């Protein structure tokens, strides 16, 4: 006891000295305290908070003491005082106060379009309808308010289909269409249970409402989830129109229904289709989404699809057809911190959206689920695996995996547990995804989870508490590639780099259904107007909405031109230092197999300078290069008129794609070096959309690609006017490398104002 007091006194003395030496202008800081770490000499937490503040500043006064949304206080401090306070025992974090504006799906600000106006006035010929194929819509959400919108465009041919709990009058000038397709579902699964789902466009799940409002929802003030992420929620294209096509049901999304929905959406007049669904990678002639997307592309409709949530494993992508815009997920600069304070004095930062009654101020016993179960998989907190007498009244550490994250908390609660620490495993690394848990809980990274479990195993009477701390913005680095985001290489066509791009997909706030709680569990009786969820399902509609902005601003652009603009203006490094984007799964630099061309930058995409354009004939030539039979091509292109010419040579490297994927063959099975070098040739054509300009090329390679020679001919392209086209050839030459080796590079055309960038991926197999 004496040593502890002496140590505390020394820490306080050092803190005061640091504060005295620092000085500086005062600003407001939020001080997060570990409630259970209060020393016994204090009568209450307010007294402890005050003493902590006085130890670093004689002049500062507490602004607020918090005891519900967080434990701690706010005060006006100098930077030096804040540093001194952060070093005190029991202080979890000292965060500078941020100035909040009312715009908080946060993605418009994060993407740099909060104050931009890329979309012409609604009611004009430039109107765009975003068709969302998903679980339906909750039309009562204010995200579908049509105030300020012009009349529904004359080209629109869609309908508002009445059904169970859904009237045709639910549509308006914002929500211009709502239809449902369930025949394939019921044929496969039998009649639906109408007590659990609606035979109508109504969204009983929430997913479809979330995605459609993310793409094109109206601005809604005072939006939040239990006070988290509070502000104004808005979609990417708030003046675009929305049409929903319910093709997903409790039993899944069936391809017959998906194709019927795509068919209707194109006929109705949608300019963009958004599909946050997938079924793995398949040959294009057997992939229903790819087939439907080809037809949509032919009729000038851009199709945006999610890459999948099977990361961080390699070659885990869905929706890889080159005529689809494939979207991976990254993080925002916003977080929802929660702190796990252990009985040994160590504190660990995680995330949580829990908003209910906090844990008691005194620490609780903590147990690892694997030691409180008779199941060999007890660590996963699967239903029925926890022993109630071993978890009652305790905080339970559960490992992430197999079952839903929020369901694990319900299992803990059902067994009598008081709280949960959800620990990542190697599969998720340090990626943190916040959840609206049903009991006090925090998700932590793999490293933190290992440390917490080590403490539980080594201490005879381990204790802990959990502090949920609210919303934090300005988090860096950001974006980071989400660990769950599916990765390349492309297993269907290795010569096409996928995903194409990443966009915000972690902890996204958007509208929600009134039929389900924020966790989606039947036991969750809470109802919310907005929810925060994560997935490439969330990143896909971001790009769908941005595509609507670009199509409205540039109605003459083809779907391929829009995608090219988004890809060639994306960024793969952080501003300032230029260091590469990071991967949440490893903490190391991410690669084009993770993020494609990079993270979307819509303000730059509006003026890309040059684009790589493509049409139906180009894609058929690509299928010819893949040696597709006439029947296979006809399946995809819906016509035998677009076949392959016998006297023409086709090359996959000739597809005018905005990125490069270059597979080399190894010299032998062991990948030994060969004296002979291999050259792979790609050809590309650029179209000016920015008027006259002279562009010079530059290339760079890194890692294993440093031995690859990249030659571009010509090295200068001069455009006299908008619409002019210029072609170039790239030759990639390399000696053999061991099988499984990968390297990366970048090719950039620049006129001093525009940078038209393409990622390059090299593999040796």
Image (cartoon, rainbow, N blue to C red):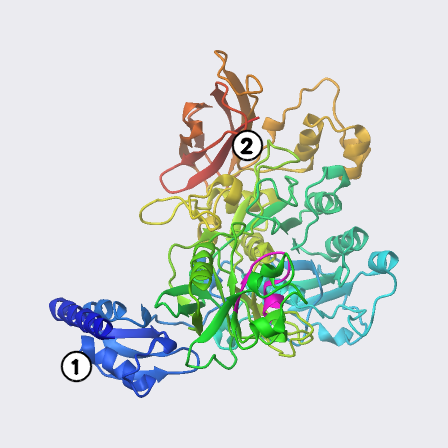
Residue sitting nearer the eye, 634 or 338: 338
517 over 120 or under it: above or below? below
Report the side of 190 relative to 347 (left or right). right
In the displayed structure, 400 sits above or below 666; it is below
Q: Is residue 539 above or below residue 650?
A: below
Separation of residues labelled 1 and 2 (CA atoms) = 62 Å
Q: Given the current orientation, which residue lies at the most extreme left position? A: 21
Residue 248's label in the rendered image is: none
Mark 1 or mark 2, earlier in chain:
1
Crowd tier of the residue under label 1, counting other residues whose Cα lies within 10 Å: few below 14, some 14–19, many 20 or above: few
Q: Name the residue beneath numbered marker 2.
A: 661
Q: Secondary structure at mark 1?
A: loop
The reply, left or right, for residue 213 in relation to residue 722 is right
Q: Position of residue 167 (x, y in %)?
A: 77, 76
Magenta extent: 396-409
- Return the residue found at the far front: 460
Circle 1 or circle 2, nearest the eye: 1
Q: Which mark is residue 59?
A: 1
Give the vertical position of 614 relative to 12 (above or below).
Answer: above
- Residue at image x 54%, y 20%? 670
**Among the 4 quarters of the image, the one containing residue 216:** bottom right
Q: Residue at x 65, y 55 (%)?
A: 276
Magenta segment: does it hold 400? yes
Answer few, some or many: residues within 10 Å of disc 2's Cα (few below 14, many 20 plus, some between 14 and 19): many
Question: In the rendered view of the protein, which quadrant contains the C terminus?
Answer: top right
Whether residue 244 is in magenta: the answer is no
């Amino acid at each position: 006891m004496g040593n502890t007091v002496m140590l505390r006194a020394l820490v306080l003395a050092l803190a005061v000295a640091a504060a005295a030496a620092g000085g500086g202008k005062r600003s407001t800081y939020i001080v997060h305290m570990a409630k259970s770490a209060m020393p016994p000499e204090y009568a209450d937490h307010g007294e402890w908070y005050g003493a902590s503040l006085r130890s670093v500043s004689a002049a500062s006064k507490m602004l607020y003491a918090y005891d519900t949304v967080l434990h701690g206080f706010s005060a006006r401090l100098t930077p030096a005082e804040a540093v001194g306070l952060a070093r005190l025992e029991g202080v979890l974090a000292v965060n500078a106060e941020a100035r909040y504006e009312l715009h908080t799906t946060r993605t418009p600000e994060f993407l740099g379009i909060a104050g931009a106006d890329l979309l012409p006035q609604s009611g004009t010929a430039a109107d765009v309808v975003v068709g969302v194929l998903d679980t339906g819509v909750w039309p009562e959400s204010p995200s579908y308010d049509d105030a300020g919108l012009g009349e529904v465009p004359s080209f629109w041919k869609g309908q508002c289909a009445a059904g169970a709990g859904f009237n045709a009058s639910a549509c308006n000038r914002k929500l211009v269409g709502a239809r449902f397709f369930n025949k394939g579902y019921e044929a496969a699964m039998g009649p639906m249970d109408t007590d659990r789902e609606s035979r109508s466009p109504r969204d009983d799940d929430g997913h479809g409402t979330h995605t459609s409002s993310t793409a094109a929802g109206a601005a809604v003030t005072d939006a939040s989830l239990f006070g988290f992420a509070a502000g104004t929620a808005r979609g990417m294209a708030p003046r675009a129109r929305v049409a929903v096509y319910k093709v997903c049901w409790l039993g899944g999304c069936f391809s017959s229904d998906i194709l019927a929905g795509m068919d209707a959406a194109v006929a109705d007049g949608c300019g963009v289709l958004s599909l946050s669904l997938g079924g793995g990678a398949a040959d294009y002639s057997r992939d229903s989404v790819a087939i439907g997307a080809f037809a949509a592309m032919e009729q000038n409709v851009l199709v945006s699809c999610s890459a999948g949530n099977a990361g961080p494993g390699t070659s885990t992508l869905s929706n890889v057809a080159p005529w689809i815009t494939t979207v991976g997920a990254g993080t925002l600069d916003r977080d929802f911190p929660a702190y796990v304070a252990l009985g040994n004095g160590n504190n660990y930062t995680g995330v949580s959206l829990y908003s209910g009654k906090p844990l008691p101020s005194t620490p609780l016993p903590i147990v690892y689920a694997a030691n409180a179960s008779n199941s060999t998989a007890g660590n996963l907190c699967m239903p029925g695996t926890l022993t109630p007498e071993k978890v009652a009244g305790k905080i339970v550490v559960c490992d992430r995996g197999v079952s839903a994250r929020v369901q694990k908390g319900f299992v803990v609660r059902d067994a009598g547990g008081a709280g949960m620490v959800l620990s990542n495993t190697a599969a998720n690394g340090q990626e943190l995804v916040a959840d609206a848990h049903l009991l006090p809980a925090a998700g932590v990274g793999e490293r933190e989870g290992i440390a917490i479990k080590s403490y539980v195993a080594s201490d005879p009477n381990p204790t802990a508490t959990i502090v949920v701390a609210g919303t934090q913005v300005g988090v860096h680095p950001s974006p980071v590639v989400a660990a769950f985001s599916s990765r390349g290489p492309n297993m269907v066509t290795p010569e096409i780099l996928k995903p194409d791009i990443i966009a915000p997909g972690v902890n996204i706030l958007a509208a929600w259904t009134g039929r389900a709680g924020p966790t989606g569990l039947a036991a969750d009786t809470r109802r919310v107007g907005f929810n925060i969820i994560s997935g490439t399902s969330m990143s896909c509609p971001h790009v769908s909405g941005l595509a609507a902005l670009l199509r409205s601003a540039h109605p003459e652009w083809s779907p391929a031109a829009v995608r090219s603009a988004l890809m060639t203006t994306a960024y793969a490094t952080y501003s300032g230092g230029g260091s590469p984007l990071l991967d949440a799964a490893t903490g190391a630099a991410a690669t084009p197999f993770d993020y494609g061309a990079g993270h979307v930058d819509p303000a730059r995409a509006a003026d890309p300078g040059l684009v790589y354009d493509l049409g139906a004939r180009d894609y058929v030539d690509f299928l010819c290069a893949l040696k597709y039979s006439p029947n296979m091509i006809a399946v995809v292109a819906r016509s035998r008129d677009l076949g392959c010419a016998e006297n023409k040579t086709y090359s996959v490297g000739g597809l005018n794609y905005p990125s490069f994927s270059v597979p080399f063959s190894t010299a032998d099975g062991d990948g030994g070096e060969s004296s002979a070098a291999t050259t792979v040739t790609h050809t590309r054509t650029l179209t000016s959309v920015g008027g006259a300009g002279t562009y010079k090329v530059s290339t760079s390679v890194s890692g294993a690609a440093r031995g690859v020679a990249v030659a571009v001919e010509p090295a200068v392209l001069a455009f006299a006017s908008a619409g002019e086209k210029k072609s170039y050839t790239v030759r990639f030459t390399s000696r053999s490398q061991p099988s499984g080796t990968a390297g990366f590079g970048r090719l950039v055309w620049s006129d001093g104002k525009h940078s038209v960038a393409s990622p390059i991926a090299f593999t040796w197999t």
